[in-house]
Amino acid sequence: IERNGNISALLELASGFDGDLTVKENAYLRGAMLGYTKEFMDETYEQILDFSELREFEERPFKQLSTGMQSRLAFSIASLVQPEILILDEVLSVGDGAFQEKSAAKMREIIDGGAATILVSHSLGQIRELCNKVLWLHRGKQVAFGETEEICNQYEKFLEGKGKGIS
């Protein structure tokens, strides 16, 4: 695979954090792991904190946060950098309903800004809302590739038939 552009990936949201470090320290740690400079993190840290809605927890050890709060921080760091290529793996259900809406709006903003986005999801609603092409995999093999509505409809029929006809 050849890529041209900076990549931001949201895969295992809570991986790579240190439970004993504070929210702020972990934000900088994650930023460094993603290749961001300290200067960039200094410039964007307040945005990250505001988007994640974790300002009051900034100096709290990361391990004291709920899984949802940890995921919100990871999502905020990855999504506020305006990537050219964005990979999302089952991550748009982070946090409460209001934060999920905020996350979906942010994803639409990134996609509308021209980022190539790969969304891995079983949520047909998210797929229909955010995707213009779908690659359906089953047990690691391609079942179908094509227009969103067509493939989502096929997948729904597959679910209704409990997977008959697919090996």
Image (tube, rainbow, N blue to C red):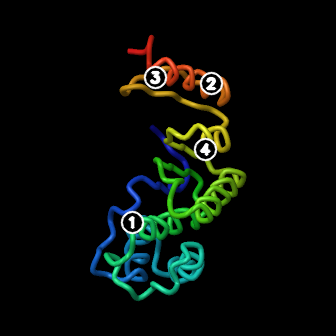
Disc 1 designates what residue? 67
In which quadrant of the rendered image does the N terminus lie? top left
Q: Amino acid at mark 2?
A: Asn
Disc 1 on helix, strand or loop? helix
Disc 2 on helix, strand or loop? helix
Identified at 65% across, 44% down, the residue is: 130
Q: Position of residue 63 (x, y in %)?
A: 31, 75
Report the residue that reaches farthest toward the top.
165
Q: Are marks 4 and 2 in contact (CB under 8 Å)?
A: no
Q: Are marks 4 and 3 in contact (CB under 8 Å)?
A: no
Give how far apart the Cα atoms at labels 4 and 2 are: 14 Å
Disc 2 designates what residue? 153
Disc 3 on helix, strand or loop? strand
Disc 3 designates what residue? 142
Q: Amino acid at mark 4?
A: Gln
Disc 4 designates what residue? 126
* 112 versus 158 height, above or below: below
Of the image marks 4 and 2, the number of the one nearer the N terminus: 4
